């Protein structure tokens, strides 16, 4: 704090003590930070003792405690008032007389705290509840005032029943008990907050004890603020003694202190002299990095950490950035509001509480199991396999969405299918362990009470915490400390109310390190700046809407209603003026140097930020001339970093090793960053990969692999000697690198099962396939093929029934959330089926469906001399023409027809039809394969067909494609050709610019055969 204030307090103490230097003195301070600083400074500089620094309500309790305790009364404990307000809001929401729109409002999470603020304002302004009712007919929303009056009455009644004293009553009691037992002098520092009770107490203190009221006048205090102080003095007889600093016009800082928010400084323009600095940075995070850099500079100049402060308008928004920057720069700091560091146990418990209202939804369950440090060994057998990460993959693969039954059934099926090879052998013990974990979790969640008292809910929460989360003592202690008093004072909560309060506490768990002034930079809210003083002060975040922040009207007590009720109720305009007062106090806290800063860009939204009008006013006051936004941009130092350059110009000014290394690399000086490569071979490889990516030749970084040392792996990538599906060959033909990633390394896209609210394309295809398969099999068994005009109506009707059955199965299997969602697609599918069957009935080609859903396996294709593969798969339908002794293959398609008229093999990417020809040849050795065709069996695709004939040319082209691909695999050239990435799952691996990089390497001779293959239509 300033020396002027200290001197004034010392003089007041000496004066008020008179002849008795040991008379206890109570000094009432606006906040504990000032109290702590004053206590230390007073003792160090004057040796005065027996002085107690108290907040006004602490002083009131000191006066009234004995009598209150004798009556069984206590002050309202922390959080209990909110819990009571929540309970009252619940009654408002269910009361018959509450209008519907206010019932809805009362159920919102923000309503109880807002109502509590309004009630406190009414109490502080001494507004009787009857006045609310009386004012209602003249208010814009009479119903709202009635509801507020009922709620305030309910709140007061509940407090009475719990024997709790709210603050205004406490002040009044303390006033009635003056002079207190000690009767020592009382000194008030700073402004007296708006409270009729406090005003009465201090008025009474002044009459009965030695009394002084000291107000430090440094710069702007606000007109309305001054007016209220004058009115208070006139009403209560309290007289403020101004403590004015010694006037100085020499520095930019003193001009700023004097002229901020006045126009008197605009006469003698002066440049900034260094006592005021303006800083801008790309975003909040870099702004904090630059502040850390300046703090280190100041420390090098000899300023001690405890002589510096960062004052924040919104500590919660800046504290994490500052904490991170200070950690990096090795700066010790004391965060008054704490640093919101994530406590893993608190976060895990919050996730557990989220599960209480769910239905064991897979995603949150796995988030809990993978995030929480669960003591699995305490309840699973010693040999159980535990891996939350693999449980995540297994449960996703098992298609679990939610519900204990689904978990049990699908995990059971997973164990069964593991025997068929769907899961790796070592996954069975993992699945069994997961089954036990889920059963236990379900029991634990079911045991959580549906209703109960605060104690019962708290006990259940702590029990769950101890059962499911390790290292949870701190979280359990905090929950118990804050929520235990509720049992005694607050009405029983609903389960939702309890969970909401507990989760609020868990989310706001903050940590404070160290102590004020023990060699740490002070970081705190501008709200505590009154009276404080540091050598160097930083005020970051000076952009519009943040500082000044937007003050919104009280929704429960609008300004006009406040004016109607009492002069003592603050309006929005007055609260907006408080923003100026806050800023002036923050600036006044700077004794030698002030750094005002702002982020130029909203780092999340990418929008440019508008510098605060306060910053412009401060710059104008400091320079004595009008400063525009453009001037400000020129005046502001840009800092050492920017969005595109998160490191300083030179390594000397780096705040940590990361900045230093980046600066050294960017310097371009040969060998400057050699230590990076020496220390980490991965960096050398990364640099090599980056260079190779843009080189003209294919390298090991482009999927060129020497497979000789790994013959088994090489065999897996070849076609020769393998049994493969047509789909796998097509993926190879689309991109050799894709083949390496999927067939070689076994990578595949993560599939997250989820609730489906629409019918997906894949589901639509499965349903149509299932219907047609069953229908044609039935018709064949009944010898009713081909379909004829006379039987068409019956066939259509049967198809409709089968469609309904297939859709019902889809819903019961959890593929779609509700049957009603399928009504639209069902009608469209039925029209498609009808049309398709009509076309079948008119088909005079002579082909008759002969076999449906035909599995083929071991179809051998000798594609080159000494080289062959075998293919497997399914054919939807085989039709036979007995007259011509031909067979044709039908493959149903329900998706998009992107085939052009001339397309056949599409550069080696489409071999399925040609492979079906070979499969049909082997299935019907005595017949000729006429054609293999895709049948786009939907109205949208106009029932188009795309076919390939079973000719020697087809066989030759297929062999040529297979030979090219097998050659590539044999040579180990799995290049990312990047000309068909559209539906590839590996775009994230290949990254951006893959097409440009591939184009660079297109002339590599090792790809010549592949590019020739691309020319096949
Ligand atoms: S993203 Fe493109 S280049 Fe990469 S593997 Fe897939 S198809 Fe090949």
Image (spheres, grey):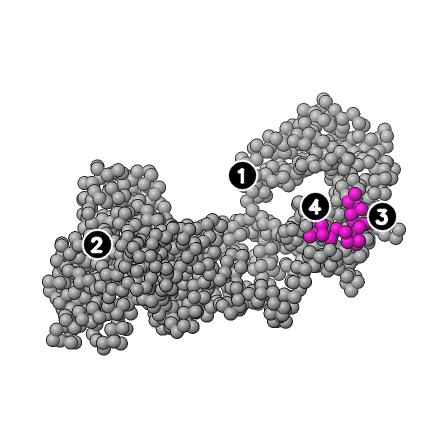
Query: Which residue bears the numbered disc 1?
Result: 818
Disc on the earlier residue, 3 or 1: 1
> Which residues, given as a range, are shown in magenta?
997-1015
Q: What's the mark number on residue 402? A: none
Taking the image as shown, residue 350 lies to the left or right of residue 204, namely right
For the residue with label 4, is its CB less than 8 Å from the closest atom of ligand 1?
A: yes
Query: Which residue bears the numbered disc 3?
Result: 863
Q: Residue at x 70, y 25 (%)?
A: 838
For the residue with label 1, is its CB less than 8 Å from the closest atom of ligand 1?
A: no
Residue 939, above or below 818: above
Q: CA distance from mark 4 to mark 2?
A: 73 Å
Q: What's the mark number on residue 980? A: 4
Q: Position of residue 958 (x, y in %)?
A: 82, 44
Taking the image as shown, residue 204 lies to the left or right of residue 107, namely left
- Contact between labelled residues 1 and 4, with CB atoms less than 8 Å apart: no
For the residue with label 3, is its CB less than 8 Å from the closest atom of ligand 1?
A: no
**Residue closer to the observer: 1006 or 727:** 1006
Q: Please state which of the two labelled residues, at mark 2 or mark 3, is closer to the viewer.
A: 2
Quarter of image, res 669: bottom right
- Contact between labelled residues 1 and 2, with CB atoms less than 8 Å apart: no
């Amino acid at each position: 704090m300033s020396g002027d204030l200290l001197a004034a307090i010392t003089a007041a103490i000496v004066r008020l003590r008179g002849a008795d230097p040991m008379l206890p003195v109570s000094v009432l301070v606006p906040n504990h930070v000032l109290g702590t600083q004053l206590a230390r400074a007073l003792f160090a500089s004057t040796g005065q003792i027996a002085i107690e620094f108290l907040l006004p309500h602490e002083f009131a309790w000191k006066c009234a405690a004995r009598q209150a305790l004798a009556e069984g009364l206590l002050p309202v404990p922390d959080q209990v008032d909110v819990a009571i307000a929540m309970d009252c809001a619940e009654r408002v929401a269910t009361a018959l007389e509450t209008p519907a729109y206010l019932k809805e409002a009362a159920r919102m999470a923000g309503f109880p705290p807002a109502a509590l603020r309004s009630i406190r304002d009414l109490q502080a302004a001494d507004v009787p509840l009857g006045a609310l009712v009386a004012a209602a007919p003249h208010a814009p929303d009479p119903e709202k005032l009635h509801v507020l009056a009922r709620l305030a009455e309910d709140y007061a009644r509940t407090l009475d029943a719990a024997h709790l004293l709210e603050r205004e009553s406490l002040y009044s009691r303390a006033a009635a008990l003056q002079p207190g037992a000690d009767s020592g002098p009382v000194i008030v520092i700073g402004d007296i907050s708006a409270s009729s009770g406090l005003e009465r107490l201090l008025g009474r203190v002044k009459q009965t004890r030695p009394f002084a009221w000291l107000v430090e006048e440094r710069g702007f205090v606000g007109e309305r603020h001054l007016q209220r102080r004058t009115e208070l003095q006139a009403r209560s007889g309290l007289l403020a003694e101004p403590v004015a600093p010694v006037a100085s016009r020499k520095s930019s800082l003193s001009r700023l202190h004097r002229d901020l928010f006045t126009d008197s400084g605009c006469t003698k323009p002066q440049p900034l002299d260094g006592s005021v600095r303006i800083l801008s940075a790309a975003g909040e995070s870099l702004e904090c990095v630059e502040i850390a850099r300046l703090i280190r500079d100041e420390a090098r100049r000899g300023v001690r950490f405890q002589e510096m402060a960062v004052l924040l308008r919104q500590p919660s928004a800046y504290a994490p950035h500052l904490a991170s920057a200070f950690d990096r720069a090795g700066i010790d700091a004391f965060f008054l509001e704490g640093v919101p560091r994530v406590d893993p146990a608190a976060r895990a418990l919050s996730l557990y509480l989220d599960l209480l209202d769910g239905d064991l939804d897979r995603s949150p369950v796995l988030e809990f199991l993978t995030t929480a440090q669960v003591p699995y060994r305490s309840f699973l057998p010693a040999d159980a396999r535990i891996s939350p990460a693999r449980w995540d993959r297994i449960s996703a693969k098992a298609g679990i969405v939610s519900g204990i039954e689904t978990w049990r059934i699908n995990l059971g099926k997973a164990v069964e299918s593991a025997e068929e090879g769907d899961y790796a052998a070592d996954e069975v013990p993992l699945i069994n362990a997961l089954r036990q974990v889920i059963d236990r979790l379900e029991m634990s969640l079911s045991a959580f009470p549906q209703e109960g008292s605060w104690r019962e809910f708290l006990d259940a929460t702590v029990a769950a915490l101890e059962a499911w989360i390790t290292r949870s003592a701190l979280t359990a202690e905090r929950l118990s400390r804050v929520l235990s008093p509720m049992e005694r004072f607050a009405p029983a909560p609903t389960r939702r109310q309890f969970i909401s309060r507990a989760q609020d506490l868990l989310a706001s768990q903050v940590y404070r390190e160290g102590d004020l002034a023990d060699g740490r930079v002070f970081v705190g809210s501008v709200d505590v700046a009154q009276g404080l003083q540091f050598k160097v002060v930083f005020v970051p975040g000076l952009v519009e809407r943040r500082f000044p922040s937007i003050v919104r009207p009280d929704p429960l007590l609008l300004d006009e209603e406040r004016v109607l009720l009492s002069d003592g109720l603050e309006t929005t305009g007055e609260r907006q003026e408080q923003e100026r007062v806050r800023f002036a106090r923050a600036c006044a806290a700077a004794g030698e140097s002030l750094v005002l800063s702002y982020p130029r860009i909203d780092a999340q939204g990418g929008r440019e930020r508008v510098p605060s009008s306060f910053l412009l006013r401060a710059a104008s006051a400091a320079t004595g001339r009008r400063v525009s936004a453009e001037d400000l941009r020129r005046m502001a130092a840009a800092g050492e970093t920017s969005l595109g350059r998160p490191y300083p110009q030179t390594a000397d000014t780096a705040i940590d090793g990361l900045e230093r290394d980046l600066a050294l690399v960017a310097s371009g000086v040969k060998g400057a960053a050699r230590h990076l490569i020496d220390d980490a071979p991965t960096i050398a490889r990364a640099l090599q990969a980056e260079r190779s990516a843009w080189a003209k030749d294919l390298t090991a970084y482009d999927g060129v692999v020497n497979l000789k040392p790994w013959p088994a792996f090489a065999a897996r990538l070849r076609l020769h000697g393998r049994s493969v599906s047509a789909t796998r060959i097509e993926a190879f033909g689309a991109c050799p690198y894709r083949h390496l990633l999927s067939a070689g390394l076994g990578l595949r896209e993560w599939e997250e099962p989820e609730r489906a609210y629409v019918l997906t394309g894949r589901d639509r295809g499965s349903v149509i396939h299932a219907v047609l398969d069953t229908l044609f099999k039935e018709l064949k068994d009944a010898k009713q093929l081909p379909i004829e005009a006379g039987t068409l109506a019956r066939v259509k009707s049967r198809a409709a029934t089968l469609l309904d059955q297939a859709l019902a199965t889809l819903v019961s299997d959890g593929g779609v959330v509700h049957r009603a969602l399928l009504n639209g697609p069902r009608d469209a599918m039925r029209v498609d089926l009808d049309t398709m069957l009509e076309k079948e009935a008119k088909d005079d080609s002579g082909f008759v469906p002969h076999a449906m859903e035909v599995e083929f396996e071991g179809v051998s294709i000798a594609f080159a001399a000494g080289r062959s593969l075998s293919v497997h798969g399914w054919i939807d339908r085989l039709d036979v023409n007995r007259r011509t002794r031909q067979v044709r293959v039908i493959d149903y398609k329900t998706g998009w027809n992107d085939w052009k008229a001339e397309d056949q093999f599409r550069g080696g990417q489409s071999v399925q039809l040609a492979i079906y020809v070979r499969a049909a040849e082997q299935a019907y050795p005595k017949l000729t394969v006429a054609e293999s065709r895709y049948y786009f069996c939907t109205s949208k695709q106009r029932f188009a067909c795309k076919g390939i004939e079973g000719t020697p040319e087809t066989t030759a082209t297929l062999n040529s494609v297979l030979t090219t691909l097998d050659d590539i695999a044999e040579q180990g050239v799995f290049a990312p050709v990047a000309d068909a990435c559209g539906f590839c799952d590996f775009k994230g691996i290949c990254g951006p610019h893959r097409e440009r990089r591939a184009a660079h390497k297109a002339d590599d001779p090792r790809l010549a055969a592949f590019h020739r293959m691309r020319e096949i239509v």
